[in-house]
Image (cartoon, rainbow, N blue to C red):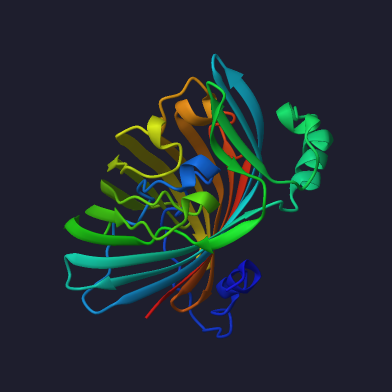
Amino acid sequence: MSFRTCACLPFVFIVTACSAWGLELTPFAVRNFSPPAIVHGLPIAETARLLNAGQVSARVSLDLSNIATDNTAKDELIYLDGETHVVTAGLRYGINDQLQLGLDLPWVSQSEGFLDSFIKDFHDWFGLPDGDRKDMENDQIEYLYQRNGDTRLFLDDEVDGLGDIRLLLAWQYARSDNSAVALQAQVKLPTGDADKLTGSEAFDVALSLSAQRDFPLSIGQGAVWAGAGISYLGDGDVIEDDVEDFAASGWLGSGWQPLDWLALKLQLDVHSALYDSDLTELGDPAVILTMGGSIGIGEKTFLDLGVGEDLNINASPDVTFHLALQHQF
């Protein structure tokens, strides 16, 4: 299956329009799409309000991220220039009113991409610095990491393939009309390919806690949500000698729903360093701010639209465009 075929999947659901809106304030399901980071099984923000018994939720998301960085530190060198495109099909099923099963099936493409010119023009228009991007050619792919002259990561061809499948089990710890708390366990399977940077070829395990509080406003309603998790990173084949054993993650977000069919959202995602390195790209925490919202397009269907920016420069992609379509059965 080609990436272009997968990229069309988010629009398959937009074939039925209903007379009522089923929009809910929920977190952005985003993460760090930097090539060395995407292979690891960090928890992704999930709603703390689980499905009722017998309910099914289906989601198809498309994420386009662009990175351009060149750095050295002591005996290390890194060069990351390219785009990562990920289509993820996700299912959630309510076993009963307290337990929920989940499955995420990603298709990952490492590509030359097409966003470089747009990003450079955007920076020029607003007078923003281009950083390392000004010295790099447009629309090329090269991922390189060396330590002590030893090449530990290299990719300069466009590739795509199945990513690491995620299995999830969530437990509803508490729930009321305006608040919810859930605990979630996750296992990342080694179904991706380390040579293609679609996976680490290792089992990763993560445990996370998420919470949300909804409240009425003079216009519409609002919500705040937060979560934190810890991951065990298995013995994979991507820069394997320098991978940290454990990584911490967290997210904090808020939303405002002024209309039945429209919500505006802001979310901060962070995680600790994934590698033992003096390079920002590998050895620094990532801090990502995603801005956007949700649009209701049916009784039980809504579309998430978001743009992510790296607040800790070069620890995550320069920009990530997020599109996710969700329907509840």
Q: Is residue 123 above or below residue 157?
A: above
User: Closer to the camera, 86 or 224?
Assistant: 86
Q: Is residue 89 above or below residue 39?
A: below
Q: Is residue 219 above or below residue 4?
A: above
User: Closer to the camera, 196 or 28?
Assistant: 196
Measured as percent of width and height from the top left, residue 316 is found at 54, 37
Measured as percent of width and height from the top left, residue 197 is found at 52, 50
- Residue drawn at x 48%, y 33% is 286
Measured as percent of width and height from the top left, residue 293 is found at 54, 56
Res. 55 image quadrant:
bottom left
Measured as percent of width and height from the top left, residue 311 is found at 55, 31
- Residue drawn at x 32%, y 44% is 227
* Horizontal relation, residue 155 to residue 127: left or right: left
Res. 6 image quadrant:
bottom right
- Residue drawn at x 59%, y 39% is 309
* Horizontal relation, residue 109 to residue 328: left or right: right
User: Closer to the camera, 288 or 23?
Assistant: 288
Q: Is residue 200 above or below residue 145?
A: below
**Residue 181 appears anywhere in the view:** no
Question: Which quadrant of the rendered structure holds the C terminus?
Answer: bottom left
Q: How many marks?
A: 0
